[in-house]
Image (spheres, helix red, strand yellow):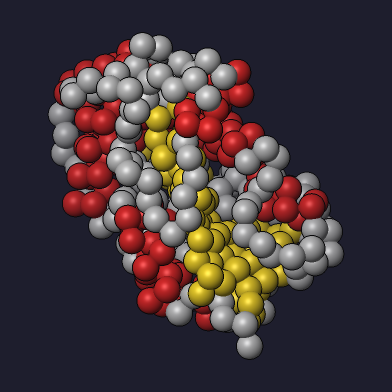
Amino acid sequence: MPNDEASTSGAMEENGIIEPLPDDAPEFMDEGTSDYDPSLAETQFGSLTSSVTGHIWEYGRRYHAFRPGRYPVPNDDEEYKRESLRHTMMKELLRGKLFLAPIGPNPQKIIDLGTGFGDWAIEVGELYPGAKVTGLDLSPIQPVWVPSNVEFIVDDIEDEWVHDNDYDFAHFRVVNIVLKDNDLALTKVLNNLKPGGWVEIQDLYPYIYSDDNTLPPDYAPNKFYDLVEAVFDGHYGFNVKYLDNLIERLERLGFVNAQRKVYHMPLGEWPRNQHLRVLGGCFREIVLDFVVAVAAKPFMEAGYDREEIDELVNDTKAAVNNRRIHAYVPIHFVWAQKPPA
């Protein structure tokens, strides 16, 4: 196992990927939003209806009601815990930063696409009190009390979500992996940025590696990721490995100054370095919660056998708690600029 932090946490590279890289619950609309009521208002994005503010319960979990089935991961309190921990982990990974794009000291308009529970948007609003920050998501799950310069909108990233062209910064975090048409979404971003504005995509590469050959060939978490790819691609039409050619995609669409940094996120508390060990522990919990979430609706809708899935979930839990396996997942930060005028 590498002993120095740089090699263990993953060297960074620009312009290229580092190599190798309860089922019988009733279905109904819920007009409430648990503890996470939306701070939504009628805006240029449209007005609210019950189909927007409600929720659907399936497979023992809560999901968005606006365009139901579009995003197959829950939006309930358990998912809030996972997303909140992921937000903390990403900030810790960047030593307190929220992004890497060089947007300058005085942005005026920022949009967070796929904002989820809104943690990133709220903290960016606090960081830039002079900027208007908009968080957009399929679910109305954001808190009521937010900074006065922050608003949340229910809409679909792949739809006509905005008609401005003056955003300084557009942000995605673990969102593009569940889009059906990344070119369409990124083209909309390009059209709505002001000249010289920036986009940043933060996402993980859905495969697990090891630098010291401790990863067994039948490693259960990789079997799980393979199944996720098969279901997300075959059943939902997502491209979970869009990161492979993201730099080229951005340049082809018209962006310039595209850059990439890749970090190796430990899976589990195996690193000797204390900072990495804390990160690895957080990531282990995030992955385990994601495994449970995906084993519900997505795998069941795709027709997989419940006993087979339960066995894979249990094997995955055991594997990520094995400190003799020095596994990591690449996390990518990619940013690019709309050509200046």
Choose between 192 and 272: the one closer to the eye.
272
Residue 162: quarter of image: bottom right
Q: Tell me how many marks there are.
A: 0
Drawn side of residue 195 relative to residue 280, left or right: right
Which x, y percent locates residue 328?
40, 30
Residue sitting at x 73%, y 48%: 123
Residue 14, given in percent of the width and then of the height, sits at 48, 55
The residue located at (22%, 38%) in the rendering is: 226
Residue 338 vertical position relative to residue 283 in the rendered view, above or below:
below
Q: Is residue 158 above or below residue 129?
A: below
In x, y percent, where is residue 281?
A: 52, 21
Q: How far across and down, in percent of the image, does residue 158 sit?
A: 42, 68
Kindly tell me whether residue 162 is visible in this rendering.
Answer: no
Residue under the point 40% across and 35% down:
329
Rendered-image quadrant of the N terminus: top left
**The quarter of the displayed image where residue 48 is located:** bottom right
Q: Is residue 29 left or right of residue 40?
A: left
